[in-house]
Amino acid sequence: MGSSASVPADGASAGERYRLVLPTDLTLVGQAVETVMACCFANVDPSRRTRFRLATVVAEAVANAMLYGNRSDRTRQVTVEIEIFADRIVVAVADQGDGFDPAAVPPPGDETLDATRGRGLFMIRRLADHVAFNPQGNTIWMTLPRR
């Protein structure tokens, strides 16, 4: 996947940890999703719903980080960190941008739901069990079930 790599992160705690570092290149979003899925479901057979939820939130978060966080600047990177527990997965996606205030993002209206842009954060919040941001607004944590 170009200059990206998937390796266990240092300092593993209770869960298995992995880190994926990507250049800002939207053509890598699909490969990033496949890598995350392979790490998260290596020893389990999740439901189709769980697979869909994880694939969608990772794709949306990585694409948002590249487009909005890094402003499509190919010199910046997106980091995906995964922590896998027996019952849940925690995925963090960080960009090198200035961040934003997630509370200031309005829920989508009818026109946004039909649009191809402007609904990623809404979808992430609907599909993940828990969503949190760092104070700067350039890292999102998403928790989902593992099965």
Image: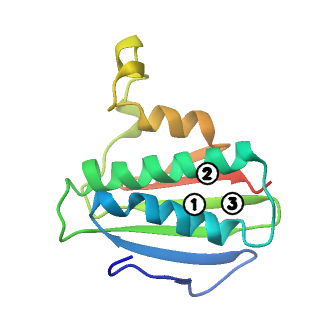
Quickly name the residue at label 3.
89
Residue lying at the far top in this picture: please name it. Answer: 110
Callout count: 3
The quadrant of the picture occupied by the N terminus is bottom left
Q: Earlier in the sequence, mark 1 or mark 2?
A: 2
Secondary structure category for the residue under label 3: strand
Quickly name the residue at label 2.
54
- Kind of residue sitting beneath label 1: Val
Give me the C-alpha separation between circle 2 and circle 3: 9 Å
Q: Nearer the viewer, residue 128 or 59?
A: 59
Give me the C-alpha separation between circle 3 and circle 1: 6 Å
Residue at 41%, 55% (x, y): give it: 62
Q: Residues within 10 Å of mark 3 (few under 14, many from 20)?
A: many
Whether residue 9 is visible: yes
Picture layout, residue 143 above or below residue 83: above
Secondary structure category for the residue under label 1: strand
Q: Are marks 3 and 1 in contact (CB under 8 Å)?
A: yes
Quickly name the residue at label 1.
91
Residue at 54%, 46% (x, y): give it: 56
- Kind of residue sitting beneath label 3: Ile
The quadrant of the picture occupied by the C terminus is bottom right
- Kind of residue sitting beneath label 2: Leu
Residue at 32%, 60% (x, y): give it: 27
Q: Quadrant of residue 36?
A: bottom right
